[in-house]
Image (spheres, rainbow, N blue to C red):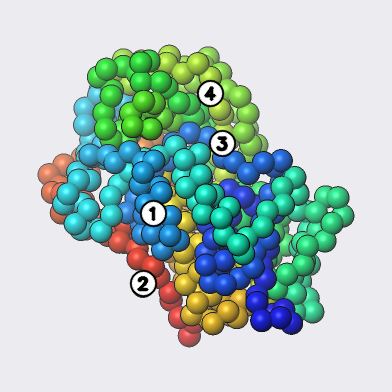
């Protein structure tokens, strides 16, 4: 701890996870310096999905109502077969779902959820920003933690939280493992309501599952826009990263898809292309006065729509751990990690399995389509209890 009475921390990264971590720490009385490599703090991308567990975390961070004002509350979750346009399975996320899990299911533009947290961060007196600061190294020792930026600047505090994404510099120092490039490419775009086919204006996240590919769409911003995500197994070796995409590449991977979902591929005027990566779960995240959070801790593919949700849970759990440890940040970090590693590992591994189901072909496709036949709404809810039933009140898993 610092020599004064107030603990200090550095959060590396100003994305959803980094902002949420800074807010969680500041709400527990920790003075936070947030370092972001970009010239401005903002968010790129399109839509994300927020399960009840995400709203439980947002409420714990004090920003749940701000997020709700910007979200679109959906009626169902639906999986369709992209080959013959039949429904594989789906369940309601209305009144009964909310009664079961205590919160709704919603979709929101990534910039809007980022802004909902940013507004609270900007007004908190214990948080200060430093943009255009690319962290290149972490040093631990002498009861403090220091990060060094690309201009040689040194930033020292009692502790460091790395929320610096899949290519985390902080994780490289703490763990030193390699990201696993999946070979799956994701294209994301936003389509205006006027350009959305009328028969696909559905108030639900709809997954069209095809052979080695799938397509997802759902409404954003009160239905004025629609999020579109297409994913395929690349024919080429991929390197993790983001760049502009092309309609021609997308179309080349979606041959044999039913005309109903296929029509969506012609609607975007521009695409962003992500080559995806995750990491194998690890039994340890941190060391001493440093830890990681969000994609730096457990990057995952998008098949369960839980990447941002897990980062929000991380932040809320970190705040609860600091409170439980009475401000001892090193002890709080170990409690936080102990409470999160197994759960997030389950999500990472479940996400990989769900990706296999989405992209099934041949007889595997027929097996996939049979899995949910005759399942009741309560059975769907029971199956998702482990994921959607998360609560901050019970999130801590004490060290033994």
Residue shown at the point (29%, 41%) measured from the top left: 73
Which mark's residue is nearer the viewer, 2 or 1? 1
Residue closest to the eye, 148 or 327 = 327
Q: Which residue is mark 1?
A: 64
Mark 4 and mark 2 in contact? Answer it, CB < 8 Å.
no
Up the image or down, 64 lies above or below 266; here it is: below
Which of disc 3 and disc 1 is earlier in sequence? 3
In what element is the residue under mark 2?
A: helix
x then y, percent, for residue 184:
52, 36
Q: Are marks 1 and 3 in contact (CB under 8 Å)?
A: no
| C-alpha separation, residue under disc 1 versus residue under disc 4 | 30 Å
Q: Residue at x 60, y 81 (%)?
A: 328
Q: Earlier in the sequence, mark 3 or mark 4?
A: 3
Instruction: Give the structural element (helix, strand or loop) at label 1.
Output: helix
User: Which residue position holds label 4?
Assistant: 271
Mark 3–mark 4 CB contact (< 8 Å): no
């Amino acid at each position: 701890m610092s020599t004064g009475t107030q603990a200090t921390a550095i959060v590396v990264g100003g994305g959803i996870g980094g902002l949420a971590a800074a807010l969680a720490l500041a709400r527990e009385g920790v003075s936070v310096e947030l370092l972001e490599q970009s010239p401005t703090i903002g968010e790129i991308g399109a839509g994300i999905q927020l399960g009840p567990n995400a709203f439980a975390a947002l409420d714990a961070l004090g920003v749940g109502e701000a997020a709700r004002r910007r979200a679109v509350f959906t009626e169902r979750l639906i999986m369709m077969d992209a080959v013959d346009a039949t429904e594989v399975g789906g369940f309601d996320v209305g009144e009964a779902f909310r009664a079961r899990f205590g919160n709704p299911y919603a979709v929101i533009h990534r910039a809007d959820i980022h802004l909902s947290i940013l507004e609270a961060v900007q007004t908190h007196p214990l948080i200060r920003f430093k943009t255009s600061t690319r962290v290149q190294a972490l040093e631990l020792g002498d009861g403090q933690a220091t990060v060094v930026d690309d201009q040689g600047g040194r930033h020292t505090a009692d502790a460091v939280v790395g929320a610096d994404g899949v290519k985390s510099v902080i994780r490289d120092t703490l763990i030193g493992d390699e990201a696993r490039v999946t070979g799956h490419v994701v294209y994301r775009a936003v389509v205006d309501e006027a350009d959305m086919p009328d028969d696909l204006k559905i108030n639900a996240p709809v997954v069209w599952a095809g052979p080695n590919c799938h397509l997802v769409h759902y409404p954003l911003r009160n239905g004025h826009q629609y999020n579109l995500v297409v994913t395929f197994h690349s024919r080429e070796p991929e390197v993790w990263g983001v760049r502009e995409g092309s309609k021609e590449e997308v179309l080349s991977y979606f041959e044999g898809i039913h005309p109903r979902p296929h029509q969506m591929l012609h609607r975007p005027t521009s695409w962003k292309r992500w080559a995806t990566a995750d990491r194998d779960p690890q039994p340890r995240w941190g060391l001493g006065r440093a830890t990681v959070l969000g994609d730096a801790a457990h990057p995952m593919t998008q098949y369960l729509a839980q990447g941002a949700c897990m980062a929000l849970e991380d932040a809320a759990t970190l705040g609860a751990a600091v409170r439980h440890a009475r401000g001892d940040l090193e002890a709080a970090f170990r409690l936080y990690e102990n409470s999160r590693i197994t759960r997030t590992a389950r999500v990472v591994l479940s996400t990989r399995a769900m990706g296999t189901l989405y992209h099934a072909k041949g007889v595997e496709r027929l097996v996939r389509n049979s899995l949910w036949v005759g399942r009741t709404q309560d059975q769907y809810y029971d199956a998702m209890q482990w994921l959607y039933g998360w609560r901050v009140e019970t999130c801590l898993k004490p060290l033994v």
